[in-house]
Image: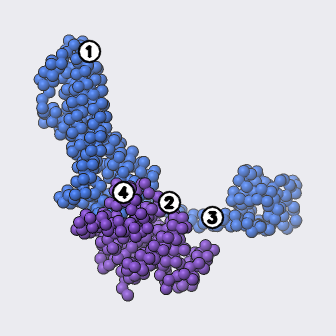
Chain colours: A purple, B blue
Amino acid sequence: MEAIISVRNLVNRFGKQVVHDGLSLDVQQDEILGVVGGSGTGKSVLMRSILGLQKPTSGTITVLGQKIEYHKPGPSCCWGVLFQGGALLSGLTVQENVELPIALNSNMPVETRHELASLKLLMTGLSLSVADKYPSELSGGMRKRVSLARALAVEPKILFLDEPTAGLDPIAATEFDELITYLHDNLDLTIMMITHDVDSLFGVCDRIAVLVDGGVVVGTVDEILGSDHPWIKHYFGVPRAQRARAAAGGSRRE
Amino acid sequence: MIFSREMTNSFLSVEDGQDRLLVSVRGNWTFPNVLVLEDATASVMPRTGQAVTFQCAGLENIDIAGAWVLYDRTQQLSELGNKSELTGFRAAHFKFLRNIIDAAAIREYEEPQVRPERPKVLRGTVENLGRATSTHIEDLGQIARSILDGVRRPSLIMIGETIKQVYQTGVQAIPVVVVITFLIGIVTANQAAGQLEKFGASVLVVDLVSISITREMGVLLAAIMVAGRSGSAFAAALGVMKLNEEVDAMRVLGLNPNQMLIIPRIVGLVIALPVLTIFADFAGIAGGALIAVGSMGISGLQFVERVVYSTDLVDFYVGLSKAPVFALLIAAVGTLRGMQVKSSAEELGRKTTTAVVQSIFMIIVVDALFATLFSRLGI
């Protein structure tokens, strides 16, 4: 299998604080990779580096064969990003937010664009009554769905999710997990997901990347659970993680 | 020195067991009692070399503050050469204490790291300053370049946004600018009237008002008003967009936020401010007219004649020519400060303030430069 995202020797340093120290990571086609790590281990910094929003101290990043450079246009036709707070453009309506990437990446006539955007909204479990609302009029969970619809608007190959279930109630979070699994199974998506939600981690992810000691430990869920690293053992040893693991044991897709 | 080693209070009692001082701890070792607890633990005075055991089985409650007092005393005693230990903790209490001990361990671990750095403080500051300056220049260059690119190939979205900006910064500001310059016209005329009447030259009030308003006051007041209104709005709007990751989202979608957000605001304001200046000029002169006609016995026709006679079109253009420059300053400072917001709401407030203060400051400095330039050129 081919690596869709490849990070090589990534170093990120802020003053004296070294966040990434020669981190290398490959994300394979069609997998859901969960990224976990303690506070300050640079989960978001890693994602932002991959998206070209953060200038790494050194290292190279390639996405879909294209080298990523800081603040230079990336493969915007082929990736979608769900930021933590949704990051919908506040001056545009829900409909316009979802249409924007379609308009930017195609010459579709307005009607097609409109219909496609509506479809994505429906796909993410929203009713079309929200289409003409502004992001400020929506709840946090709805904003995330709209943001997901926008991320999916141009049929991306890669989906980046930054804590997709953070701030959602358990029902919404479970639905969101199911939605992601459903989309992944049906759309040939490669997903990279930062999450602290152990339920998502066990229920959704194929592989887990744990950021520790400035580097990364990657493996399947079982491999990571068998790891000897003290932080990893601690993380997956807490009761919350144990329960999630037990709950996911029967239902995890293989 | 002789004093009793046996002592008792509501928090602890001490029992001298020759080679070992037994301290029984009890009661509520909690935050409100910290001062008393410190006195109590300080009163535990073992002989040289005598070991101390704190028996904690009698504790009712302990919180982090209380645990800290206890832990701190054992550390002090250890430093004095008295071995000391804590025993008889209930599990729940012990957890609190562990937190303290861990915190203390971390603190001690960090200290040696900080010390060797001290001689380099100056160097570090200079290095940081240099790095910050070079990043700033780099950012500025990048923004300038993307703006030039954007102006060369404007997109439809940008044109729509520019029109919106002209409306918000220009059209909506007309009432307040008109009222303010009208009032300043009245004030100027009133002040001048008192002085010029002494020389029997009342009619010169008209000259004074119309020349000062068209050359200086009109454009200056409009610019300062707009700096307060729109400079802050630019900084705040862009700052919030940065905080909401909207700017990042735009980049990921393949849009250039520098183009999409900065150009419409700069172009919009460069169109809006000259128009506002024209309104301001007329309103200011109208204010002067009110005083001249109303309380100085100059007729309306006389006033108009005098304005036309005293004020050249050049005066009007001198004022108007400054408007686009001021507009550029206000929009550039406001948007750049907004884009500098990185992480916090507090920073947003600071940058907004800076945007307004800096743009007003720069308007006045540039105005002074213009004044010098025009007088050198004899305009």
**Element at label 4:** loop
Dot 2 amino acid type: Arg
**Horizontal and vertical percent for residue A80?**
36, 70
Looking at the image, residue A22 lies above or below residue B239? below
Q: Which is in the foreground here, disc 1 or disc 3?
A: 1
Q: At x 76% / y 54%, what residue is drawn?
A: B37
Disc 1 designates what residue?
B295
Q: CA distance from mark 2 to mark 1?
A: 71 Å
Please name the residue shown 32% across and 45% down the image.
Answer: B231
- Give the number of the mark in front: 1 or 4: 4
Q: Which element carries disc 1, helix, strand or loop?
A: helix
Q: Are marks 2 and 3 in contact (CB under 8 Å)?
A: no
Name the residue type under label 1.
Answer: Ser
**Of discs 4 and 3, which sits in the foreground?**
4
Work out which quarter of the rendered image holds the N terminus of chain B and state it: bottom right
Residue B133, above or below B289: below
Q: Chain of mark 4?
A: A
Work out how far the residue at label 4 is from the one at label 3, CA to CA, in angstroms.
52 Å
Q: Is residue A191 left or right of residue B57?
A: left
Number of other residues with Cα within 10 Å of mark 4, as a class: few under 14, some 14 to 19, many 20 or more? few
Snapshot quadrant of residue B106: bottom right
Subunit under mark 2: B
Of label 1 and label 3, which has the lower sequence position? 3
In the image, residue B349 above or below residue A147: above
